[in-house]
C-alpha cells in the first residue's frame, strides 16, 4: 500500500490548459441558452434518477444499443474502478501495456492485485504478442487495453483485437476514451463477446470533463454484474440533464473534433521542425520527445501554456504531452513554440 499515491495535477492558473487532454471548447453557454427554463424545474433537493433512465434511453439510441447494455459512471475513472473491483481480488493478475493511463496501476495497487505491464515496442506500437503471452502465462483475470492509447495515441488495429480475443481467455476491458477522434470502435465486437467491456467518456470530444460522465458498454449480463457494485445515485441530476441536452448538439461536437484534428496537424508540423520525435497519436493530444523537452515545457508555461511532462518515458529522449487548443489559441501556441531556442 506504500506505493499508493493520490492523483496529482500541476498548477494551471492563468494558463491555457493543454496538460489534461480536455476539449478546449466551452459549450456550457450554448447549452444554458437553450435550456434556461427547463433548468429551473430541476429539483436538486431530490435524489436523481437512480439509473438515469431517461438519459439511458437517449444514449442507447445514440450508440444504437439496448439501454440494458449501458452502465454510467462518475467519469470513466469510476467505471475503471468498478470493473477492476468486480473482476479482481487480492493477488489476482491484471495485464496491461505501458506506458498507458495511470489509473489502471493505481487501482491495481489499491486492490492488492498483481500488475504486469508489457512495454510498447520502440516505435510506440503496443506489443500485441507479448500482451497475449503475458496474459496466458500469468493466468490473468483481466487484460486492460487503451485504444487510442493515453499518452501515446497508439491505435490497436481490428485484426490485432481479434487476435487478442481468439488467443486469450480472460476478461478484456477496452478503454475507448478517445474513440470519437478515430474512425474505429469495438462496440460490435464487445457486444458479441461474453468477456469484453468498452469504456467511453464525455470528458474528451464532448467537452464535459467538469460534469464527470462515463459510459460502459457490454452484454446485459456483464452490465448487470457490474451494476451490483455501483454506488447508488452516482450520476447527479445536473450531469444527467446536461448530457441529455448535449446529445442534441452532436453535429457541433463533430465539427469541433474535426477542428481539433486539423489544429493537431499544424502543431505536429511545428514540433517536427523543432527536431522533436512524435508518437503517432490518433487522439486529441500529441506525445513528443526531445533532449530539451523540460525546457520546452518550462518556456511554454512561462508563455501561458501548461503541458504535461512524462519523465518516466525516457526513450529516445524525455517526453511531454500536449492536447490541442481551439483556433483562437492555436497561433499563439505555434508562435510560442517557434520562439523557443533549442
Image (cartoon, rainbow, N blue to C red):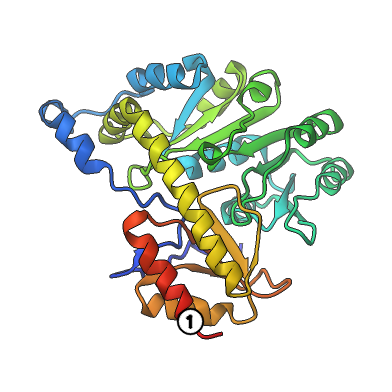
Above or below, 194 relative to 235: above
Q: Is 18 left or right of 186, judged from the image as shown?
A: left
Residue for point 84% across, 42% down: 132
Q: Is 298 left or right of 249, judged from the image as shown?
A: right
Please name the residue that numbered disc 1 is placed on: 340
Residue 282: x and y in percent read: 60, 47
Count of numbered circles in the view: 1
**Closest to the observer: 11 or 250?**
250
Residue for point 58% across, 16% down: 220
Q: Residues within 10 Å of mark 1 (few under 14, many from 20)?
A: few
Residue for point 80% across, 57% down: 121
Residue 181: x and y in percent read: 53, 41
Residue 127: x and y in percent read: 80, 50
Residue for point 56% across, 63% down: 269
Residue 63: x and y in percent read: 49, 22
Above or below, 170 relative to 131: above
Amino acid at each position: 500500500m506504500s506505493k499508493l499515491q493520490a492523483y496529482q495535477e500541476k498548477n494551471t492558473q492563468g494558463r491555457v490548459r493543454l496538460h489534461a487532454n480536455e476539449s478546449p471548447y466551452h459549450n456550457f453557454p450554448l447549452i444554458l441558452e437553450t435550456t434556461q427554463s427547463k433548468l429551473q424545474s430541476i429539483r436538486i433537493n431530490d435524489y436523481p434518477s437512480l439509473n438515469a433512465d431517461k438519459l439511458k434511453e437517449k444514449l442507447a439510441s445514440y450508440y444504437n444499443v439496448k439501454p440494458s447494455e449501458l452502465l454510467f459512471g462518475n467519469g470513466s475513472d469510476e467505471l475503471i474502478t468498478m470493473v477492476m473491483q468486480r473482476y479482481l481480488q487480492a493477488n489476482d493478475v491484471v495485464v496491461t501495456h505501458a506506458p498507458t493511463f495511470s489509473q489502471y496501476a493505481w487501482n491495481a495497487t489499491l486492490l492488492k492485485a498483481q500488475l504486469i505491464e508489457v512495454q510498447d515496442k520502440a516505435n510506440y506500437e503496443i506489443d500485441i504478442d507479448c500482451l497475449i503471452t503475458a496474459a496466458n502465462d500469468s493466468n490473468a483475470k483481466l487484460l486492460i487495453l487503451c485504444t487510442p492509447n493515453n499518452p501515446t495515441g497508439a491505435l490497436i488495429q481490428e485484426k490485432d483485437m481479434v487476435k487478442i480475443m481468439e488467443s486469450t481467455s480472460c476478461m478484456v476491458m477496452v478503454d475507448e476514451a478517445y474513440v470519437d477522434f478515430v474512425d474505429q470502435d469495438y462496440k460490435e465486437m464487445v457486444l458479441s463477446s461474453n468477456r469484453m467491456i468498452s469504456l467511453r467518456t464525455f470528458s474528451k470530444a464532448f467537452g464535459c470533463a467538469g460534469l464527470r460522465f462515463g459510459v460502459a458498454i457490454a452484454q446485459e449480463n456483464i452490465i448487470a454484474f457490474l451494476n451490483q457494485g455501483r454506488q447508488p445515485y452516482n450520476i447527479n441530476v445536473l450531469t444527467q440533464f446536461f448530457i441529455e441536452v448535449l446529445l442534441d448538439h452532436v453535429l457541433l461536437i463533430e465539427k469541433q473534433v474535426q477542428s481539433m484534428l486539423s489544429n493537431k496537424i499544424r502543431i505536429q508540423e511545428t514540433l517536427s521542425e523543432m527536431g522533436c520525435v512524435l508518437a503517432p497519436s490518433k487522439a486529441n493530444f500529441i506525445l513528443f520527445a526531445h533532449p530539451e523537452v523540460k525546457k520546452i515545457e518550462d518556456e511554454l508555461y512561462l508563455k501561458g501554456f501548461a503541458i504535461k511532462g512524462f519523465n518516466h518515458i525516457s526513450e529516445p529522449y524525455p517526453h511531454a504531452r500536449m492536447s490541442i487548443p481551439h483556433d483562437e489559441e492555436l497561433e499563439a501556441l505555434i508562435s510560442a513554440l517557434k520562439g523557443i531556442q533549442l
